[in-house]
């Protein structure tokens, strides 16, 4: 156990070794139905098929309620699909997928643990000795710019700082795949841009495969290699766009003004707009 | 505010003394503050028919404390188990509700008959009273766990036991500790009631004896003593709460509470 821990520590300083660990995500015919309170089956996602290549940063954009979180739930293995299959690294997902980092839509820090203890949970659960876990967690807090805040509790931090802790906690085990569910949705515009830039920096060092969910098209285009558009509920993949902006992308706020960014953003928006309007009409009709 | 706060007991006790002294209220039935004071002094200086007051107090505290610990342990254990396991909750839940509906005083009478006049039936009654309070809180605490946190710790690789250790138990602890405040009061009540029903030592026995002799002053004196014990215990539990729940943000409700 201790030996494995040592290997992990070494891998942090060695980006070559880390990127070799990225895994492919292969989703085929994924369908998820829920039974609603009234006992009526409700299809949340229907026949979703796409593949995220190892080390690729893939974003999914779609209107609220179209089944983005549900799709991510099946990839993480927290839920089981009603039909179709999810394979991670060539292996069928069955139970919680190993080697996954997850950043949740809602705040998912443990309020009774200090910042340091929160970041330590991952390595501790993987059997790392306490001393090594403390050291590794301190390292990661430094990487996300939170050195000196180790002993604070989550409620003593700002929203942006809490997201940094969540990011360190999700990345500390150097996951093969990173799942992010609107991780910066609740942040103000400036903090959001800073966090996006930091995420890109960390991703370029570790290079896991990323599945990044958002309803913010600008965010998707600025960060991803590929943007998938999801249709209104029941969600399925409508269209896929390759983002050929050069990497490293640097400051997210700068990219937004580049002509190529605006061009891509315009193309994708034309496709997304229909779905957003349809979703709006659905909810307005129901209300 | 402080002045008004001090004024309340002054008015109540002063009024009580005044009414009984002037004979508007009969001190034979309602006691008298000065008489209560004399009884207190007498209890501590000359002891009781059943040994010194310290011995009797210690017996009651011991019974309440054991009952408290036993009831709390059982309540937490069963609450956590049933809270996490739907099947167990469905099987055992109804029986717990049935047991909970039995009047405690009847249980006390049964315990005394079954287990005699010793310490055990008192501990048992106190434990039963404590158990239900702690159990329902622990159970609810588990049910209120944030599913996001459970999902998070699972993705990080936690086994079911580790989910309990890292999320369920710390989360339920807020509820459990809140219940302990009331629970200790109930432990004392349980011990006292069982002693009144039949005992060889204890404050409850003193109360029932004094009541039999229409010595209301001693009844009030015993009441005062148990109140002090309960307040001290309450203070200790608050200290524990502050320590264990140090992570909680200070809530506005708490800042304004008494
Ligand atoms: N556990 C569940 N039970 C019933 N319906 C659900 C459940 N989870 C999600 N849904 C429904 O599935 C749809 C998709 O939800 P979700 O994946 O959270 O959407 P979003 O794209 O906003 O993340 C929504 O209409 C939601 O109400
Ligand atoms: Mg969602």
Image (cartoon, coloured by chain):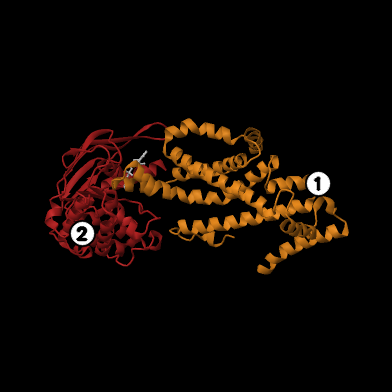
Chain colours: A red, B orange
SS under mark 2: helix
Rate crowding at label 2 as few (under 14), some (14 to 19) or many (20 or more) other CA atoms within 10 Å: some
Picture quadrant of residue A249: bottom left
Q: Is residue A152 visible?
A: yes
Residue A191: give x, y in percent of width and height.
Answer: 30, 63
Pointers 1 and 2 in contact (C-beta within 8 Å): no
Across and down, in percent, residue B184 comes to 58, 49
Helix, strand or loop at disc 1? loop
Q: Is residue B105 above or below residue B254?
A: above
Q: Is mark 2 within 8 Å of ligand 2?
A: no
**Ligand 1 closer than 8 Å to the CB at disc 1?**
no
Residue A202's label in the rendered image is 2
Q: Is residue B81 left or right of residue B181?
A: left
On the image, the x and y values in percent for residue A235 come to 27, 40
Q: For residue B109, what is the image quadrant?
A: top right
Q: Quadrant of residue A262?
A: bottom left
Q: Which residue is mark 1?
A: B213
**From the viewer's perspective, is residue B176 above or below residue A245?**
above
Q: Tell me what residue is drawn at x 31 percent, y 45 percent.
A: B158
Tell me if residue A138 comes above or below residue B122 in the rendering: below
Q: Quadrant of the C terminus of chain A?
A: top left
**Front tag of 1 and 2:** 1
């Amino acid at each position: 156990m201790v030996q494995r821990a040592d290997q992990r520590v070494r891998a942090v300083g060695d980006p070559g070794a880390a990127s070799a660990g990225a895994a492919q995500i292969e989703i085929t015919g994924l369908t998820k139905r829920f039974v609603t309170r009234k006992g009526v089956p409700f299809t949340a996602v229907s026949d979703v098929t796409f593949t995220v290549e190892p080390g690729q940063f893939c974003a999914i954009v779609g209107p609220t309620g179209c089944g983005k979180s549900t799709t991510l739930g099946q990839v993480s293995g927290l839920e089981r699909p009603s039909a179709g299959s999810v394979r991670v690294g060539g292996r069928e997902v069955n139970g919680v997928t190993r080697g996954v980092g997850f950043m949740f839509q809602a705040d998912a820090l443990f309020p009774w643990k200090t910042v340091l203890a929160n970041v330590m949970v991952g390595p501790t659960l993987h059997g790392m000795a306490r001393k090594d876990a403390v050291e590794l967690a301190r390292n990661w807090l430094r990487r996300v710019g939170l050195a000196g805040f180790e002993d604070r509790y989550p409620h003593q931090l700002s929203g942006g700082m809490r997201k940094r802790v969540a990011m360190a906690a999700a990345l500390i085990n150097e996951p093969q795949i990173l799942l992010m569910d609107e991780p910066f949705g609740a942040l103000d515009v400036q903090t959001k841009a800073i966090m996006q830039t930091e995420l890109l920096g960390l991703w370029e060092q570790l290079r896991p495969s990323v599945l990044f969910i958002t309803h913010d098209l600008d965010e998707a285009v600025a960060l991803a290699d590929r943007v998938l558009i999801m249709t209104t509920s029941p969600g399925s993949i409508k269209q896929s766009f390759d983002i050929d902006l050069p990497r490293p992308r640097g400051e997210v706020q700068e990219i937004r003004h580049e002509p190529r960014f605006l061009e891509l953003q315009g193309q994708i928006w034309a496709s997304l707009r229909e779905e957003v309007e349809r979703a709006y009409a659905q909810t307005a009709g129901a209300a | 505010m402080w002045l008004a706060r001090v004024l309340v007991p002054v008015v109540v006790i002063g009024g009580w003394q005044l009414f009984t002294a002037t004979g508007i209220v009969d001190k034979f039935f309602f006691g008298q503050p000065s008489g209560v004071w004399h009884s207190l002094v007498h209890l501590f200086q000359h002891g009781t028919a059943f040994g010194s007051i310290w011995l009797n107090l210690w017996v009651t505290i011991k019974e309440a404390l054991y009952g408290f610990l036993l009831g709390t342990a059982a309540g937490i254990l069963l609450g956590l188990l049933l809270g996490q396991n739907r099947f167990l909750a469905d099987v055992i839940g109804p029986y717990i509700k049935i047991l909970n509906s039995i009047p405690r005083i009847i249980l006390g009478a049964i315990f005394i008959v079954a287990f005699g006049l010793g310490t055990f039936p008192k501990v048992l009654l106190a434990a039963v009273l404590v158990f239900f309070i702690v159990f329902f809180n622990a159970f609810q605490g588990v049910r209120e766990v944030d599913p996001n946190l459970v999902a998070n710790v699972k993705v990080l690789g936690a086994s079911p036991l580790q989910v309990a250790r890292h999320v369920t138990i710390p989360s339920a602890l807020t509820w459990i500790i809140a219940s302990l405040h009331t629970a200790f009061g109930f432990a004392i009540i349980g011990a006292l009631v069982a002693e009144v029903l039949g005992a060889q030592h204890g404050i409850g026995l003193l109360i029932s004896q004094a009541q039999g002799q229409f010595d209301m002053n001693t009844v009030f004196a015993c009441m005062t003593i148990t109140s002090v014990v309960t307040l001290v215990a309450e203070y200790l539990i608050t200290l524990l709460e502050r320590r264990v729940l140090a992570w909680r943000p200070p809530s506005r409700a708490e800042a304004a509470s008494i």
